Image (cartoon, rainbow, N blue to C red):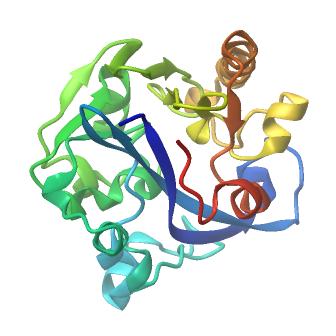
Amino acid sequence: MPNRLRALLTGRHRYDKTLSTRQRGAGVIIEAPILAYLIETPNGRILYDVGCDYAKLSTPALQARYFSPEAFCYGAPTMTEDQRLGSHLQRLGLQPQDIDLVFIGHLHFDHAGGLCEVPGCELHVQADELKAALAGSDEAYFLDDFAQFKFTVQRGEYTLAPGIRAVSTPGHTAGHMSLLVELASGPPILLCGDAADLHENLEHDIAPGLCWEEREDLALASIRKLKAVALETGAQLWPNHDLAFWAGTMAARDWH
């Protein structure tokens, strides 16, 4: 069986565009998809990111606690029962135990909160990312999303499975990772993660709004690296929070 890739819509979040395009787009409210990616390989199933913790969005007391207006002035993300990771897996005839590996690109709440939906899976994260997250280096880390889990801690780039390669792209966070996925036909797909929220980040070399320790230079270097890897491999670049790109390219398609 060749590698197959499916994008799973696990929620949406409305916010000021400057959170995605650094110092550009102030006053423009965008609606961003929150995605997880299911990759089926001959050696097992991999999830890249897992979306938010549904309980923190669906329980009023928890939402008020975690998404205070002071920290999240544009409000919490939205997530329906059908958008939960477990619901996606169920529709595909899968259960959490059918996932062999969860690869967390970074530990922000909208990428790692859904770890509670896939208990018992092997979990990969970068050492620099885990260190920064445990230190609470920015407000988008929710400690109880991930602190109770045992991770296989990685350092640098590596191959997860044949044709699946982790690509180091720090800048948005300390240990952010993207993922290059080779398919049986057509070009590879380079999942940018939050190294590039929007197609605009890639087209115009614009850093994401939130940069670890204000390292815009590091974020820009990662954007340029993504484009260089795409040029070298012929890969398509998939930005991570671009609603138009999701609707036009990713939605309701099984890439293989």
Image location of residue 34, percent across then percent down: 55, 61
* Up/down of 114 relative to 205, above or below: below
Number of numbered discs visible in the structure rendering? 0
Q: Nearer the viewer, residue 165 or 54?
A: 165
Q: Which quadrant of the structure image shows residue 106?
A: top left
Q: Residue at coordinates 69% horizontally, 45% vertically from top-left?
A: 197
Left of 28 or right of it: where is 249?
A: left
Q: Residue at coordinates 28% horizontally, 19% vertically from top-left?
A: 154
Image location of residue 203, percent across then percent down: 88, 33
* Up/down of 233 relative to 241, above or below: above
Which residue occupies the extreme bottom position in the image? 60
Q: Evaluate whether residue 126 shows in this view.
A: yes
Q: Residue at coordinates 48% horizontally, 45% vertically from top-left?
A: 5
Image quarter hosting the N terminus: top left
Q: Which quadrant of the structure image shows residue 41?
A: top left
Q: Residue at coordinates 37% horizontally, 55% vertically from top-left?
A: 50
